[in-house]
Every structure is written in structure tokens, then in C-alpha cells.
Amino acid sequence: MFSLGPGRAAMEPETKRWKGSKCAMKGSKCDVKGSKCDVKGSKCDVKGSKCDVKGSKCDDYSWVAFPVLSDEQSADVELVEAYAAPIVDRKATSRLVRELNGVYPLPGLQHVKRVRACRAEDSPHPLEVLLCLLRDAPNPTDASVPSLLPAGSWEGLGEPFVVKVPARPPLTRPQFELASRRWPTTFHEDKQVTVALRGELFGPQQRALMHTFMASAVAAARAAAQLGMEAVGAAVVDPETQRVVAVGHDRRGEHPLQHAVMVCIDLVARSQGGGCYRHDRYDACRFAPIDPQPEKGAVPYICSGYDLYVTREPCVMCAMALVHSRIGRVFYGAAAADGALGTRFKIHTQKDLNHRFQSFCGASGSYFCDSRQTGRQARGGGRHAARVIGTRSRTRDIRVEDWGLQTWDVLTRCATAARPCL
């Protein structure tokens, strides 16, 4: 889960601010010049869209940025078996529910309604009620009222039967719709998440700005490719002023740690008087010096409140660097097999970290498809990148603190002039 921080008015929709963090939308097809991307519940056909980076001419509607949600928000609906029974006497409903709550309170299933209307239109019993979970039944093999319930006044109940009910409360509308097909469920909807899952979080004007910023990252990636390096570019933007703070590209031909994101973070640190690398020999790597006397009187800590646009999904090292540098949001184009913001891991949703940010995935035009193919060939083996959308990450399989210590060493040298954030 994540929430929007201050200083985002320039890029936020007019509705209430969105709280939330995986692209969980199965079922649709997004054909980017031959590539396929499963997205639950949406359709995005950007085949043939054109994006001329040099001229900054992009189709405002060719890029749909979908949120990279947490595993909990994008997981399939987990079901648990329970016993239910028809209510043959409608007038006894209140009494039966009160007595059942005393015998089987159903802890952990507060999101499940105790009574539902009978689905069969021709059924003589208009209502059905949950009795107990199958695992809590005294004798699971004997499905009868005397066996399941203690002695008492249970007149009005019909013959019990087994149903499957949602084990956890739904967090998104797709989860709610699936859960409700099994049994009526309560749902506290975050409408911003629902809008984001439809690809409608950003309006045309906002998408035009996003294209401009991503075009800067694409141009940097092409400059890196011309130098024989990995074709990955990144740009850091201040969404409050719509100013590009820094643009960088991959420089691993010179240093193994100089991924595009790490270079961009270092350039932001340089704009604040810090930084540890020299970028003079690379024309595409540049930064805009910060106002020495900002209006609010405080220089931001590296990337606090900023957005990152990067042509390829960051790796674990870069994702942890973004955590430590306090980035606000990340927009990336192509997924990566070792990506840490949706494909393999979801570092940005880890609850035990002291900072979390939003992540969005989406691609426009053919460049990202070409860049993804170039990345596969560079890594060797030609293996396909794991799909971001509708998949569960392996975040729990790693110890983020181990990666954090390695990345923190780099960041502390990059931000020598920045004030401590911890």
C-alpha cells in the first residue's frame, strides 16, 4: 500500500488522492508491435503508435500507466469451505442469526455477510445462512443440524450444505466482484484504485506531460546505445513545478554499479551540491541546479517528492536506492526479468521499509519492445521477461536489509551535501 505525498498537485487527478501500490488486471491484451501483455480487465492496443523522441511527438493516448499493486491487492480470491443452510421460515431469520453468532461467531470473516438471498429463482427458500466453517464443525462428515449445532431451538433451518466463502476481505473491485460471486461480501472501495485499474487515473493533459518526461528518458537510452552501453535511460522530475531535475543513462561499460537509475540519483545529488561520479564526458547525462534559496527554505533530501521515469523496470539494487533516496513515484516502460517493482519482486510495497513509493508500469510505441529485446540479448539466453501484470512477486524470498546495506553505501557517497533522512 502507498499514499501520495505532498507536492503532487501538478500531476494528480481532480478526484481524491489515491492510496494504494502491482499491475493486477488480467484478461486484456496489450499488443505493442508484436509483444503481449496480459492485463486483467482492460484493453490497450498501442500497436502502430508513433513516438518521435527527437521531435517529442507522442500520441497522448498510446501510453496507459497501470499501478503496480501489492501482492495482497492483486492476489486471487482465497476461498474457505463452510456449512450453510436454507432458512425455511423467513420470520425466524433474526433469531437464528443471533443464536448462530453466539455459537459460531466466525472470527476473521467479518467481511462475509451471514445471510444471503437464495440464487435459485424457483427455490422455496428465499434466504440462506452461514452456520460454521468446515474446519470448526464437530463432525465434518455429518452434515446435519443436530450434528453441527448444539441442542437448542433451531426450527426454521433446512438441510445444511457446503459452500466456499472468501477467506479475506477484498481490497480492489476485481477482487470484490470475484468474491461476491461466491458469497455476499462487504467492500470498502478506494475509488482511486478502481480508476487506476481502468487506466483512467491520469487525464489527457497529464499523459501528455508524462510522455514528454518519458521521451527524455528514451532519448538518454538511445544515447547510451550509441555508446555501446545498455539502452536504458531515466529522468527525475519535480511534479510540483514540472521541471526535469536530472536525466541519465546506463554507464555500466565504465562501472558495474552505474545503472541508469543509480546515475540519475547521483545527478540529482549533484544538483544539490553532492554526488560522487563525474558525468562530464556524457552529454546526455545532465542535471538542473537547484535554487540555492528555495521558497520553503529547505533543500529536499535527494529525490524526496520527485517522480522517476525510466525505460526499463529497475533491478533490486536500483529499487532500494529509490527507497533510500525517498522517491515519490516511479513510471517504467518495459518489464525486466529481474525487475524489482512488479516482475520478480515488489520492493516498493514492503511494509517493513521506512519509505514506500508508488510504481506504475506501461509502455507506448515500439521503443520499449525493442529495448526489452535488446536487454534480453545483452543478458544472453534470450529468455522472456516475466509478465508484470497479474503475477505474484517473490518479494518475501529476499532480505531487503541485505540489499539496503549495499545500496546505502553508494547513496551516502552520492549525497554528501544532503541532510540525513534517518
Image: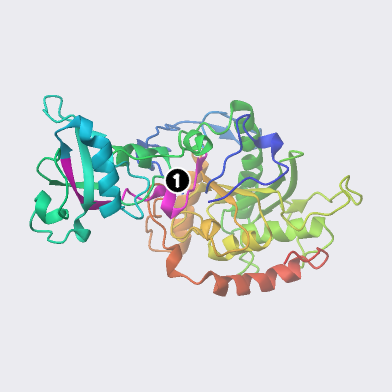
**Depth check: 235 or 85 in front?**
85
Q: Position of residue 229 (x, y in %)?
A: 59, 59
Which residue is at a point 44% across and 66% down the rendered structure image? 396
Residue 417 among magenta residues: no
Which residue is at a point 80% across and 59% down the rendered structure image? 270
Vertical position of residue 88 compared to residue 375: above or below: above
- Kind of residue sitting beneath label 1: Cys
Image side of residue 255 versus residue 194, left or right = right
Query: Start and end of the magenta stretch?
Result: 65-85
Which residue has dot 1 on it? 23
In the figure, residue 206 lies in which quadrant?
A: top right
Q: Secondary structure at mark 1?
A: loop
Sort mark 1 into few (<14), some (14-19) or many (20+) by Cα contacts within 10 Å.
Answer: many
Residue 410 appears in the picture as rendered: yes
Colour mapping used in the image:
rainbow
Q: Position of residue 25 (x, y in %)?
A: 39, 41
